[in-house]
Amino acid sequence: ARFNSAPPSQPSRTISISVSSPIDEASLVAAVNAFGTPRNMAACGKGAYTVTYFDLRSSVAAVQRLRGISLGGARVHARFADDVAWKHGVLAVHNVAATVHNVELLSLFRNCGDVMDLRGAGSLRVVSFYDVRHAYAALALSGTELHGSVIQIITAALAASGGGLPPSPHPSPTQNSQ
């Protein structure tokens, strides 16, 4: 199978696998599972598969170790695919008090799993997890009080769509004058 697009420049949780000749699908499933639990695996045509892992580190290991190997007599090609679900491991943290340092937030979020990155300053911070399951677990931290402010956490996908945050408990000045 041939892929029409160039591989993405960044690793993603989704990988594309092509094999040069027919193989036993069970051996491919076993090879894919050796790197971590896949969130999804789908056949995309003759000898082409897409695998999405929960954990970014699993997909990186799979691409590095599967690329160019022989599996059941078939040559395997593995590369990162465009990951339309890249935001699944990313959370937007709103209403963060200015006195909260990223080191303190990092400590809080590490209780949910391995954090890949934490960025931002002021009232909005963005935290990225290697494993999407850890990001979903971290959503439970919404409502936590830090330095007198109650933080609100939503997925980056929801934040990008412009939704997700409940109305502020404090009315705006224009609402008071009505």
Image (cartoon, rainbow, N blue to C red):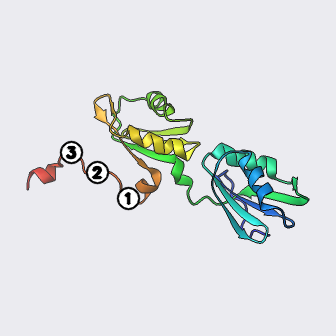
Q: Residue at x 78, y 72 (%)?
A: 46
Task: Locate residue 168, reporting x and y percent.
Answer: 24, 47
Q: Residue at x 35, y 37 (%)?
A: 96
Q: Residue at x 34, y 34 (%)?
A: 144
| Above or below: residue 113 compared with residue 44 | above
Graded by Cα atoms within 10 Å as few (under 14), some (14 to 19) or many (20 or more), the crowding at tag 3 reads few
Picture disc at residue 147: none
Residue furthest to the right in view is: 73
Which element carries disc 1, helix, strand or loop? loop
Residue furthest to the left in view is: 178
Rounded to the nearest angstrom, the CA distance separating label 2 from label 1 is 12 Å
Mark 1 / mark 3, whichever is N-terminal = 1
Query: Is 55 on the left-hand or right-hand side of 150?
Result: right
**Amino acid type at image mark 3:** Pro
**Amino acid type at image mark 1:** Gly
The residue tagged 3 is 169
Task: Locate residue 81, reporting x and y percent.
Answer: 68, 59
Rounded to the nearest angstrom, the CA distance separating label 2 from label 3 is 9 Å
- Does the rendering let one see residue 121? yes
The residue tagged 1 is 162
Graded by Cα atoms within 10 Å as few (under 14), some (14 to 19) or many (20 or more), the crowding at tag 1 reads few
Q: How many marks?
A: 3
The residue tagged 2 is 166
Which element carries disc 3, helix, strand or loop? loop
Task: Locate residue 5, reporting x and y percent.
Answer: 71, 67
Task: Locate residue 157, reporting x and y percent.
Answer: 46, 55
Rounded to the nearest angstrom, the CA distance separating label 1 from label 3 is 19 Å
**Amino acid type at image mark 2:** Pro
User: Looking at the rendering, which quadrant does residue 34 occupy?
Assistant: top right
Graded by Cα atoms within 10 Å as few (under 14), some (14 to 19) or many (20 or more), the crowding at tag 2 reads few
| Above or below: residue 167 compared with residue 46 | above
Query: Is 149 on the left-hand or right-hand side of 89?
Result: left
